[in-house]
Amino acid sequence: MDEKPKYWPHIGVTALTALLVCEIFTNILFPIYYPGYNWKTQSISYLGQDKSPILQWVKIWSISFSVGYTIFAFAFYYTFKNKGWLIGLASLLLIIYGLGEGIGSGFFPVSTTETTATTNAFLHNFFGGLADISLFTFPVILLKTFPFSGHKNLWTWTLVTYCLSLLFCSFFLIAKYQGIQSGFLLYKGLWQRMFVLCFYLYFFQVGRLMITRINS
């Protein structure tokens, strides 16, 4: 018997909404208490670097971020668990993303004064990289689970998200590692935030699919 979920889709969408609201709130509030920080040209990680005056607040937000995505992952799993083991894998990828981009990055601040690579910097980049791999793998798993014939909207959103997020991610990485001093590529903070926004919008489409699961 195909038992439909009752509350999990709503719990997942609520968690995702809270995450986006807090993401916007912290992006507005944190720079106010960090004199000299420029959100357009400096990355999000810079807010949590070892000399940051708001380091403790960044750590609190990183915990909340990880918890929020873990809740969303469980909601996703319990909504679609009848579709097979790939749903479990996709849910695990969401948890890895939440932990890597949240606690993994937030609790290993990079240093702006050290000239050599530090353990914290290595772990920060490792967990951040693992989170990004999980983030880009998640949609692939979804497309293997939800066929094009019945989910054209999801496939379209996946294609658009990949194209835009890869574009913004490329701009961010070029600005970060090539030492760009002028032009539109200078705004690595902006491109990083646009990249994050792409996946928030994509996850809301996933949330819409979860809600549809109740009503179908």
Image (spheres, rainbow, N blue to C red):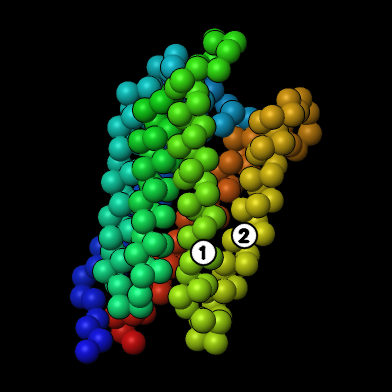
Could you say which quadrant of the image residue 189 lies in? top right
Q: Residue at x 51, y 81 (%)?
A: 147
- Residue 16, image quadrant: bottom left
Tag of residue 139: 1
Total labels drawn: 2
Q: Nearer the viewer, residue 55 or 70?
A: 70
Extreme residue in the front direction: 85
Nearer to us of marks 1 and 2 is: 1
Question: Which secondary structure, mark 1?
Answer: helix
Among numbered discs 1 and 2, the one appearing first in the sequence: 1
Q: Horizontal placement of 78 versus 127: left or right?
A: left
Left or right: 68 with respect to 106? left
Q: Is residue 80 visible?
A: no
Q: Secondary structure at mark 2?
A: helix
Q: In the image, residue 5 lies at what x, y percent?
A: 23, 76
Amino acid type, label 2: Tyr
- On the image, the x and y values in percent for residue 110 come to 49, 22
State the separation of the CA atoms marked 1 and 2: 9 Å
The residue singled out by tag 2 in the image is 162
Which residue is at the front of the view, 196 or 144?
144
Does 69 sit left or right of 32 as displayed?
A: left
The quarter of the picture where the N terminus appears is: bottom left
201 in relation to 4, above or below: above
Name the image quarter holding residue 65: top left
Q: Is residue 216 above or below residue 197?
A: below
- The residue depicted at 72 percent of the width and 36 percent of the height is 174
Residues tagged 1 and 2 counted as in contact (Cβ below 8 A): yes
Residue 129 visible in this rendered orientation of the protein: yes
Crowd around label 1: few <14 · some 14–19 · many ≥20 (10 Å) = many
Counting from the top left corner in percent of width and height, residue 159 is at: 62, 67
